[in-house]
Amino acid sequence: MKRKSKSQKVYDYIEELIISGEYKPGERLPSEAQLGETLKVSRVSVRAGIEKLSAIGLVHKKKGGGTYVNKPKNDNYLSVFTPTLLHNTDYLELMEIRRALDSLSVQLCTQNITEAGVRKLGKIIDRMEHLEEDDDFFELDKKFHLLVSKYSKNRFLHNIHLIIWDVLQKTLRPKYTKVTEPSAYDRVGSHKRIYEAIVHKDENLARIYTVHHLEKVIDTFKCEYNEAYQEAREKNQKKET
């Protein structure tokens, strides 16, 4: 079993303090010296751990000294769980969760979306179809699915999607890029079919196309990583049991 680094020890300790509610948004964390003494690590390790937490937006440093817990952005009260997911998330498991949640989101979206929302989705599809060299398909994909979850009109569900895409962007993007290359599957066509089902208010078809789209991504991932991935996953499951 790989030994945890000292900076990771600091990261995990502070993360737990925040998630447990011992330190709330806006509150100041113990000083570097205090943290070093508590955890029996150097101030260099403490700084490295704090820098990791700052990079994902959980804490920030103020001029004049002190590290403070950030307030969740976008009123997403679930974002406190993002740090844990950032270093404990399996890509395949995340996509399996997406397959279930995206299906629900698109069903609710089809029922609730406005004409303005349909136009916004249409613009994203148009950009996907005329993708230029400087365009980032990830950002268009993210906008499309977050817009669908937004128009589900279920704030709790939308907040979960915000976290999922945050994790994808910050830690799983290389795997995402690998399995969403144009040669891997019809990525534009799959989104267009979902969009057209939404336009025609066909929630069952929208769900079918959404599930099919994500199953293609999952199948591509399994083909790309196959044996090496399965071996690593089985080892992790054995450790947990």
Image (spheres, rainbow, N blue to C red):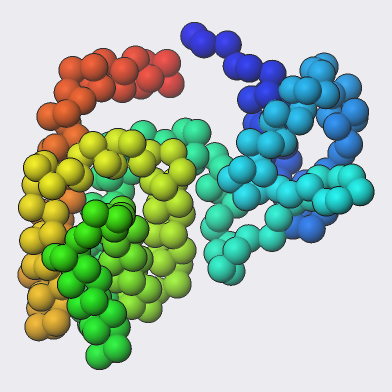
Instruction: Give the x, y percent position of residue 238.
Output: 36, 16
| Placement of 232 over or under 84, stated as above or below | above
| Placement of 202 over or under 173, stated as above or below | below
Instruction: Give the x, y percent position of residue 19.
Output: 66, 46
Residue lying furthest bottom: 115
Residue lying furthest front: 133
Left or right, 122 with respect to 91, comes to left
Residue at the location (8% across, 61% down)?
189
228 vs 13, nearest the viewer? 228
Left or right, 220 with respect to 14, comes to left
181 vs 99, nearest the viewer? 181
The image quadrant of residue 139 is: bottom left
| Placement of 77 over or under 9, stated as above or below | below
The image quadrant of residue 45 is: top right
Residue at the location (55% across, 48% down)?
81
Instruction: Give the x, y percent position of residue 28.
Output: 85, 49
201 vs 33, nearest the viewer? 33
Can residue 23 be seen here? The reply is no
Can residue 153 be seen here? The reply is yes
How many numbered dots are placed on residues in this image? 0
Work out which quarter of the rendered image holds the C terminus and state it. Answer: top left
Instruction: Give the x, y percent position of residue 74.
Output: 56, 68
Residue at the location (38% across, 39% down)?
172
Residue at the location (76% across, 30% down)?
47
